[in-house]
Image (spheres, helix red, strand yellow):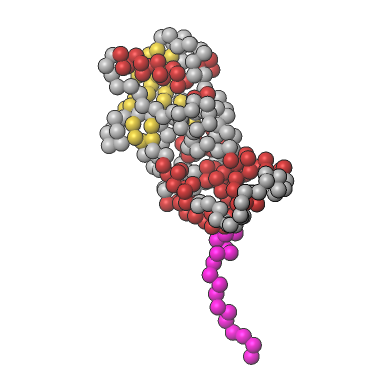
Amino acid sequence: MRIVLNIWRQKNAASAGKMVRYEMSDVSEHMSFLEMLDVLNETLIAKGEEPVAFEHDCREGICGSCGFMINGVAHGPMPGTTVCQLHMRHFKDGDELVLEPWRASAFPILKDLMCDRGSLDRIIASGGYVSVNSGSAPDANALPIAKETLDRSMDAAACIGCGACVAACPNASASLFTSAKISHLGLLPQGQPERDDRALRMVAAMNEEGFGSCTNIGECEAVCPKRIPMEFIARMNRDYISASWTSRPLKAEVGGAG
């Protein structure tokens, strides 16, 4: 089938970018979206032109490396799907698609469809680790955890850090990502020793990176390829407020017995 691509081309972070039009006349419906871009790049290289830069790794929807806007939607039109899992059978012959990188001040563009998402890594690093001395590793079933709690923790841990939530949010908020990383540890017994400090540090790091504030628009949940629910944002806010209150320095009591 025939597909028309309008792709954002930008040589480097310091250069101005522009949309460039490409026509592909022999696209198989069995190709994944990234395989279709591979074919485009092979054609460009054969012509002596610069290939389109885009990030990818596992191509199985696990690593979170791939990701860009397709017709204004993060990861494209299919819900719960990364770009690498999106197939051309979901498009029609003659479709014209616009491909752009994630656009957020905390995600500076590196080249074409690639941007620097190191800010997400720095948020994770700020959370630290569980430092309690627990001795040798216990048996897996030695610490009973309620199934509901375990399921919610695993739902949060499913986040792959692709950044689609930031790209889709009108405020460029990283609240869904940060709340998932805080919650998947904070829900488990092993995560309790550092729970308050983790919430304070990670929210502070998120703000320092220049992400916007959450106003509960819901675009983050709508485009998340792992369907992370917004309820984790409320949990993050509760943890942050609680930790902020309990970490306040005690004030000296005024007055006393007469």
Asked if the stretch drawn in magenta spans residue 249, the answer is yes
Q: Residue at x 35, y 16 (%)?
A: 42
The residue lying furthest to the bottom in this view is 258
Q: Kindly indicate the quadrant of the structure image that contains residue 220.
A: top right
Highlighted range, magenta: 240-258
Q: Nearer the viewer, residue 84 or 241?
A: 84
Q: Is residue 248 above or below residue 166?
A: below
Q: Residue at x 61, y 55 (%)?
A: 134
* Residue 91 appears in the figure: no
Q: Is residue 102 above or below residue 203?
A: above
Please tell me whether the stretch drawn in magenta is mainly helix, strand or loop. Answer: loop
Q: Is residue 131 above or below residue 18?
A: below
Location of residue 40 in the rendering, given as x and y in whole percent from the top left corner: 38, 16
Location of residue 232 in the rendering, given as x and y in whole percent from the top left corner: 60, 45
Q: Is residue 191 left or right of residue 1?
A: right
Q: Residue at x 28, y 14 (%)?
A: 47
* Residue 144 appears in the figure: yes
